[in-house]
Image: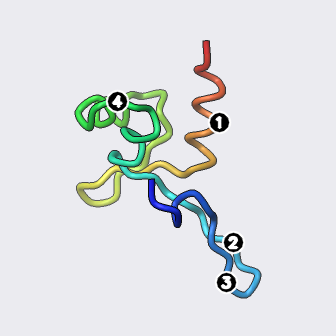
Amino acid sequence: MSENINNAKSVENKEYTVFYTTADIAECLGCSLATARQLFRRADFPSLKIGKNYKVSKDAFEQWAKEKRV
């Protein structure tokens, strides 16, 4: 993942939500892009569909991953 994704940005004390794409999730989880796309379509995954693209907020993804940890 690029460095700007790992660090939340602040401008003039305003916090911005960081979003991951399917490619970011595939890299993070060490899976294929096709597997990441399937994950985004699961009902229990906290994804957002923006146009044709899927996104997930960093915080929501981390919370989901903690809950799914075996």
| Other-residue count near label 4 (Cα within 10 Å), few / some / many at <14 / 14–19 / ≥20 | few
What is the spatial separation of the Cα atoms under label 4 and label 1, in whole angstroms?
19 Å
The residue at 63%/48% (across/down) is 59
Quarter of image, res 9: bottom right
Residue labelled with disc 1: 63
Q: Are marks 1 and 3 in contact (CB under 8 Å)?
A: no
* Pointer 2 or 1: first along the chain: 2
Of badges 2 and 4, the one in the foreground is 4
Labelled disc at residue 11 = 3
Three-letter residue code for mark 1 = Gln
Question: For numbered disc 1, what is the local secondary structure?
Answer: helix
Q: Is there a contact, CB below 8 Å, between mark 2 and mark 1?
A: no
**Residue at 49 percent of width and 57 percent of height:** 19
Q: Earlier in the sequence, mark 4 or mark 3?
A: 3
Q: Is residue 26 above or below residue 50?
A: above
Q: CA distance from mark 2 to mark 1?
A: 19 Å
What label sits on residue 15 in the rendered view?
2
Q: Quadrant of residue 25?
A: top left
Image location of residue 15, percent across then percent down: 69, 72
Residues tagged 4 and 3 counted as in contact (Cβ below 8 A): no
For marks 1 and 3 on the same chain, the one whose residue lies earlier in the sequence: 3
Dot 2 lies on which element? strand
Query: Is residue 49 shown above or below 33?
Result: below
Task: Give, as a three-letter code, the residue at label 2.
Answer: Glu
Observer-side mark, 4 or 3, equals 4
Q: Is the residue marked by circle 2 packed among few (<14), some (14-19), or many (20+) residues within 10 Å?
A: few
Question: Closer to us: mark 4 or mark 1?
Answer: 4
Q: For the C terminus, which image quadrant?
A: top right
**Label 1: few (<14), some (14–19) or many (≥20) C-alpha neighbours in 10 Å:** few
